[in-house]
Amino acid sequence: IYHMKEHSLLVEKYRPTNIDNYVGNESIKNTIKSYIDQNDIQNLLFYGPAGTGKTTLAKLCVRNLDCDYLYINASDERGIETIRDKVSSFASVASFKPLKVVILDEADYLTPQAQASLRNTIEAFHQNCRFILTCNYINRIIDPLQSRCKMFNVIPPSKSEVANHLKGILNTEEIKHNINDLAKVVKQYYPDLRKMLNSLQGNIHKGELNIEGDKENSDKIKELVDILISGGNPTQLRTALV
């Protein structure tokens, strides 16, 4: 099921390389599949909470398209010079691929001046270059950029989907684990899948997962585990996870 890569970090090792392995957001996945089939995309803007897979979706697009791409983390390179020097240069250079794509990750960190410059760059190179923006806070993206992109609200997968996904990873890694520990991690860090994976990895010792827990919550955790195992209805699961 999972594509194995040479990474020591679980969060990187199990970053999906195929859209079918992405957890949740089925309607967005179907739209991206149609883009991949025609080897073209619109300008896209993925927004939503941290750790829910916006960057993963952006990278899945470029990995499965016949394209050259440029990735920029806008939280590190947030000024107008990044747009003028890096983005515009990339967009203007000839390519042997049929498409060029610029990923601007965490675009809500771009300064207003940089966002205004990006708007002009998108217009100037609309024939041969597409842009994918990700952000946590959509209100920090200027309206002219929003109007030039197809916007997708990336929502977290359900807690049961996340739990099954993490269990699959632990089984693949042959990590001994108690499902109570897995439930604790999901409960504590949901919806941030990245934090869950990092927490799991930080608590693996000699091939076994061991999460220090609060005994007061043991009954509630057991209830959650029982529901997950028995495939209980959504109402039961929501009640147990509150």
Image: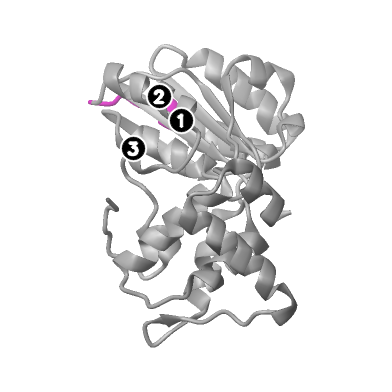
- Residue at 67% from the left image edge and 71% from the top image edge: 219
Q: Compute the Cα span from label 3 to label 2.
A: 9 Å
Residue bounds of the magenta highlight: 89-96
Q: Are marks 2 and 1 in contact (CB under 8 Å)?
A: yes
Mark toward the start of the polypeptide (3 vs 2): 3
Q: Compute the Cα span from label 2 to label 1.
A: 6 Å
In this picture, residue 97 sits left or right of residue 181? left
Residue 93 magenta-highlighted: yes
Disc on res. 20: 3
Disc on res. 26: 1
Three-letter code for the amino acid on which mark 3 is drawn: Asp
Q: Position of residue 209 (x, y in %)?
A: 46, 79
Q: Residue furthest left?
A: 96
Three-letter code for the amino acid on which mark 2 is drawn: Asn
Foreground pick, 149 / 203: 203
Mark toward the start of the polypeptide (3 vs 1): 3
Q: Is residue 87 visible?
A: yes
- Residue at 36% from the left image edge and 47% from the top image edge: 16
**205 w.r.t. 164: above or below:** below
